[in-house]
Image: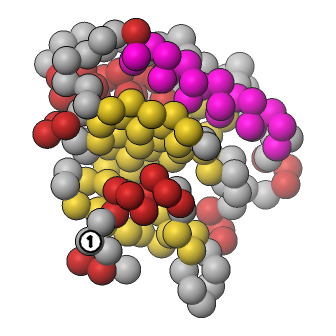
């Protein structure tokens, strides 16, 4: 999948949230970068084994409460740069106009929150087993609320505090 193959990526992401490779039936991760989209495949080895999974109902509750909390905090800030803020069907979309779009979505198969940033690209957050159910970056770069706070602060050149949504 090349970026030129899909001209209107944003509506596809909002409408479907996930594309599936025709032959393998494996999902294809979407990465929004500025005004264009890039696509990246992932493999079955990215799926956690049964021992490291949390119950699906716990995943659903934790992920949904985090996305809803982030939505509420951003909405309460009344940011001038915010063109659209939407949280539907497990996808949080933060459209900052010319600055770009942040997308966060629940990914059931991997039990992660997938994060797409106009600054840094794609990131993945999983519930830390020993961290009081906090969403931690799979590469060790912190937790999702602090990560989003930092990137939005950098982009908007103002303090954005979204901590406490764990």
Q: Is residue 117 visible?
A: yes
**Residue beneath the point at 75% across and 37% down:** 59
| Picture coordinates of residue 119, whole percent (x, y) | 23, 42
The reply, left or right, for residue 95 in relation to residue 158 is right
Position of 85 relative to 17 (above/below): above
Q: Nearer the viewer, residue 134 or 82?
A: 82
| Picture coordinates of residue 112, whole percent (x, y) | 62, 45
**Residue beneath the point at 48% across and 23% down:** 71
The reply, left or right, for residue 160 in relation to residue 73 is left
Q: Is residue 30 visible?
A: no
Q: Nearer the viewer, residue 131 or 20?
A: 20
The reply, left or right, for residue 107 in relation to residue 42 is right
- The residue under label 1 is 7
| Picture coordinates of residue 133, whole percent (x, y) | 70, 25
Q: How many marks?
A: 1
Q: Quadrant of the C terminus?
A: top right
Q: Nearer the viewer, residue 144 or 103?
A: 103
Q: Quadrant of the N terminus?
A: bottom left
């Amino acid at each position: 999948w090349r970026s030129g193959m899909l001209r209107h990526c944003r509506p596809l992401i909002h409408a479907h949230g996930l594309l599936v490779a025709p032959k393998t039936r494996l999902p294809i991760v979407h990465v929004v970068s500025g005004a264009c989209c890039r696509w990246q495949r992932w493999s079955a080895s990215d799926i956690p084994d049964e021992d490291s999974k949390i119950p699906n109902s716990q995943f659903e509750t934790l992920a949904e409460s985090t996305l809803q909390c982030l939505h509420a905090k951003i909405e309460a800030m009344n940011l001038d740069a915010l063109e659209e803020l939407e949280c539907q069907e497990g996808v949080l979309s933060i459209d900052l106009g010319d600055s770009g779009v942040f997308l966060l979505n629940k990914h059931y198969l991997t039990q992660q929150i997938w994060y797409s940033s106009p600054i840094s690209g794609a990131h993945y957050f999983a519930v830390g087993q020993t961290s009081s159910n906090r969403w931690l970056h799979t590469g060790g770069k912190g937790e999702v609320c602090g990560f989003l706070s930092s990137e939005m602060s950098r982009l908007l050149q103002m303090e954005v505090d979204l901590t406490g949504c764990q």
